[in-house]
Amino acid sequence: MAFQPGHKKIPGSGMKKGQKISETAENRQFNRQIFLPLVDEAAQTLLDVMRDTQAPHTARIAAANSILDRALGKPRQEVEHSGDAAQPLEIMIRHFSDEVPNSVVSTELDDQPRII
């Protein structure tokens, strides 16, 4: 049941203070036990969608990409650096808000980036 405004939350429900969301080895093992038997069926579903000429193109492309990613691995995103390789790469981060950032990062050529 979703939370309804004006109603109290159930005691003991929700995350505990300081609790972190993480995927533990135990969780991964549990997920494998549940989903491993479904791998063949899921792969067949992707193949069926990809080969279905009546399916929307977006669904067929998504299925094909999913198959390629699993078979070949996801392609890496290449970044081109057109400047002098001996000089450090300057990274500029812009804040898209009306507020002024609390700190500014300095990137002097002879120094490592630092917060000032």
Image: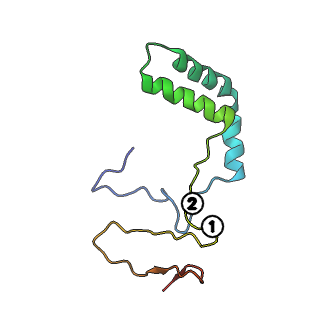
In this rendering, position of residue 99 left or right of residue 26 = left
Q: Which residue is mark 1?
A: 85
Q: Residues within 10 Å of mark 2 (few under 14, many from 20)?
A: few
Please report contact status of discs 1 and 2: CB closer than 8 Å, yes or no.
yes
Which numbered circle lies on residue 81?
A: 2
Which residue reaches farthest front? 84
- The residue type indicated by label 1 comes to Ala
The answer to which quarter of the image holds residue 112 is: bottom right
Image x and y of residue 105, in percent:
48, 79
Q: Nearer the viewer, residue 64 or 1?
A: 64
Q: Residue at x 49, y 23 (%)?
A: 60
Q: Nearer the viewer, residue 41 or 30?
A: 41
Which residue reaches farthest bottom? 116
In this rendering, position of residue 28 left or right of residue 47 = right
Q: Nearer the viewer, residue 49 or 22?
A: 49
Q: Residue at x 61, y 29 (%)?
A: 67
Image x and y of residue 55, in percent:
44, 17
Q: Residue at x 37, y 46 (%)?
A: 2
Count the labels in the image: 2
- Whether residue 93 is situated above or below residue 72 in the rendered picture: below
* Type of colouring: rainbow
